[in-house]
Image: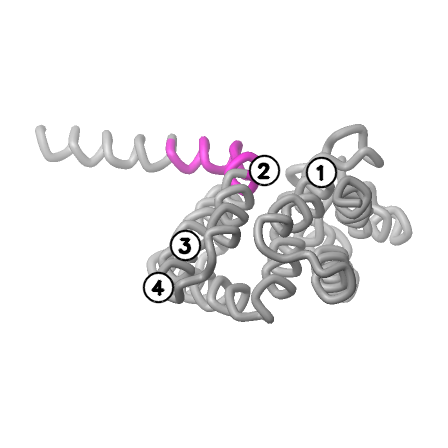
């Protein structure tokens, strides 16, 4: 049954609601911005109403299967790991988009809301909010680049593990976090690469100016 439940969770995650909403609003997200078929690109392309709908649906498709299986199929402990990661994998590698997918941010919030009764997802939201305020202050309220956004998401999720350890969550939750973290690193790999290059150039320019 575990294989069946995992497949159902994967199928739920692979439903690309934001992409389909984009088509419904006559916008092909794969040709807009960075081509991300997720909710944030939908927000930018079609406006906040469509974007909010995409975020809610992406959240639900992660939250619902994990919550239902925990409550009705008595899935706990290490059995939770494939169930929790399957929706995120489905979103990142959707068969409906030939193995392509989104950044898996909203669905990550959904999964962790189900796993921890919203506790860890709330911590992640607070960390991201702090990062956003700090970035706005550093850039004098200028628009934040996609590479900075990507770095903030991955860095925030990395910091979440400190809270998970401090709260004494079981090892299955820690392993789930690790899998989710690696998936977020993968889905944001291009943003992280550009962020690293930008930081590297800034550091090199500063060193050159200092040496001259």
* Lower position in the chain sequence, tag 2 or tag 4: 4
How far apart are labels 2 and 4 at the CA level?
A: 27 Å
How crowded pointer 3 is (Cα within 10 Å; few <14, some 14-19, many 20+) is rated as some
- Residue indicated by mark 3: 161
- Tell me the residue at 71%/38% (across/down): 101
Quarter location, residue 187: top right
Tags 4 and 1 in contact by the CB under 8 Å rule?
no
Task: Specify the principal SS of the magenta part.
Answer: helix
First in residue order: circle 4 vs circle 1: 1
Q: Residue 166 carries which label?
A: 4
* Mark 3 or mark 2, earlier in chain: 3
Q: Which colour scheme is used?
A: one colour
What separation in Å lies between label 3 and label 2 (alpha carbons)?
Answer: 19 Å
Quadrant showing the N terminus:
top right
Which image quarter holds the C terminus?
top left
Q: Is mark 1 on a helix, strand or loop?
A: loop
């Amino acid at each position: 049954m575990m294989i069946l439940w995992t497949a159902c969770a994967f199928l739920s995650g692979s439903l690309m609601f934001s992409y389909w909403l984009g088509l419904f609003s006559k916008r092909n997200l794969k040709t807009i911005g960075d081509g991300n078929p997720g909710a944030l690109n939908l927000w930018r392309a079609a406006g906040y109403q469509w974007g909010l709908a995409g975020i809610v649906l992406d959240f639900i498709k992660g939250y619902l299967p994990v919550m239902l299986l925990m409550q009705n199929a008595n899935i706990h402990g290490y059995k939770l790991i494939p169930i929790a990661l399957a929706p995120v994998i489905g979103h990142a590698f959707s068969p409906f988009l030939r193995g392509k997918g989104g950044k898996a941010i909203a669905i990550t919030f959904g999964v962790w809301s189900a796993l921890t009764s919203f506790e860890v997802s709330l911590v992640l939201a607070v960390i991201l909010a702090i990062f956003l305020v700090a970035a706005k202050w550093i850039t004098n309220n200028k628009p934040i680049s996609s590479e900075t956004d990507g770095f903030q998401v991955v860095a925030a999720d990395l910091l979440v593990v400190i809270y998970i350890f401090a709260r004494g969550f079981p090892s299955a939750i820690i392993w789930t976090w690790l899998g989710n973290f690696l998936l977020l690193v993968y889905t944001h790999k291009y943003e992280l690469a550009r962020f690293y290059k930008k930081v590297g150039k800034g550091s090199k320019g500063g060193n050159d100016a200092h040496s001259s």
